[in-house]
Image (tube, rainbow, N blue to C red):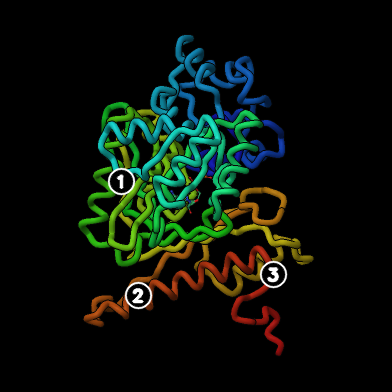
Amino acid sequence: MIGGGQLARMTHQAAIALGQSLRVLAETPSDPAAQVCADVVLGSHHNLDDLRRAAHGSHAVTFDHEGVPTEHLLALQSEGVTVNPPPQALVYAQDKLAMRRRLTQLGAPVPEFVEVTAVADVEAFWAQVDGQVVLKAIRGGYDGRGVWLPRTLDEALTVAAEQLDAGVPLLAERRVALARELSAMVARSPFGQGATWPVVETVQRHGQCAVVIAPAPGLADAAAGRAEALALELSRELGVVGVMAVELFETADGELIVNELAMRPHNSGHWSMDGCVTSQFEQHLRAVLDYPLGDTAARAPVTVMANILGAEVAPEMPLDERLHHLMARMPDAKVHLYGKDERPDRKVGHVNIVGGPIGDPGGASDGSAFADYVAAVRERAERAAHWMATAEWTDGWNEHGME
Ligand code: ADP
């Protein structure tokens, strides 16, 4: 796996159970995956020789991020290395303009967009969409970096000028009036098998994912079916091998619009580690290595994942002591830590709460009992993650039992 982040770390966990071993190309020995894998190649994903050292002799090469230059992957392919997802597919997760164009060709719903090669393009597009403009770096953005939501035309022109001057290729797209964000995850194997997970709701804070609710509460069966069918179709049409997340916007009138594609395990699939028969990490390996795919059924009516996001100021209480207290208070909380130093807003782990069996979820005819149940599971997941990040209980609970 190219990249030694938390996705590689958790993929390694799944590889162990399959009797496989994961080699990682990591930048430093302290990368999350390098800390736990026995087979670590230190180097850069920008360097073809480093990539070769990691890739040669493997059954297949796959990724923890989208940063590897396409020309290097084509070189590896020409040397006989199996690259999954293949670079011909991966480019649609690396290049937002190529993705928008290809999805338009396929008839998939995307926001109106335009390539920005000069500041004047932004001015024209601003008029075209009544100022509802989002600017995006075509490559290299993640967790909201490389995305700008300008409030005025002046601001839009300034951002565009700065970025173009710095050599950053840009696109502009219509700002969607979104009701919420969803993610449809799918896996596809070289054999052509495809499997989707239930569609989830992703809650963003400060431009990055904070909470995932699985399945997305209140999503009509027909809409969920459409989203899963779209994910399957895109994975097939683009030739994806492995796991893909299709990030979606849901508008107020229930329309679904594709925001982004990620061709790797994804934050919106972390709930599957505890909430599904087959986790996204195991499924990614099954797909990349061409095993039959696993059952993607949920184990509970709802599972909520909350990211542990580094606090503004890291608490004095050590992380391990926070873990100790969390375990004492919430024995069902499933914690996954990434071995990363805490920094403001940095993803250092996540907590999954798998909802318990419910006696009679359909008891209230208007569905409010089920909504309360989902809200309670979410509240517990967020409380646990907030505690882990800040050493503060959102409900003022005192872990030493004193007033
Ligand atoms: P990244 O690649 O950094 O994840 P995204 O393209 O997913 O960037 O954008 C980050 C966030 O910005 C999205 O989750 C969404 O909240 C907001 N956003 C992006 N594009 C649009 C859009 N066209 N309309 C409205 N909000 C958007």
The percent position of residue 13, horizontal first and vertical second, equals 52, 43
- Label 3 within 8 A of ligand 1 by Cβ: no
The percent position of residue 159, horizontal first and vertical second, equals 61, 43
- Residue at (70%, 61%) from the top-left corner? 320
| Local SS, label 3 | loop
| Local SS, label 2 | helix
- Residue at (30%, 67%) from the top-left corner? 218
* Residue identifier under label 2: 371
Q: Is residue 224 above or below residue 168?
A: below
- Disc 3 marks a residue whose amino acid type is Ala
- Disc 1 marks a residue whose amino acid type is Thr
Of mark 1 and mark 2, the one earlier in the sequence is 1
Furthest-right residue in this view: 316
Q: Nearer the viewer, residue 116 or 181?
A: 116
The percent position of residue 282, horizontal first and vertical second, equals 42, 41
Bin the neighbour count of mark 1 within 10 Å (Cα to Cα): few under 14, some 14-19, many 20 and up: many
* Residue identifier under label 3: 391
Q: Are dots 2 and 3 in contact, CB under 8 Å?
A: no
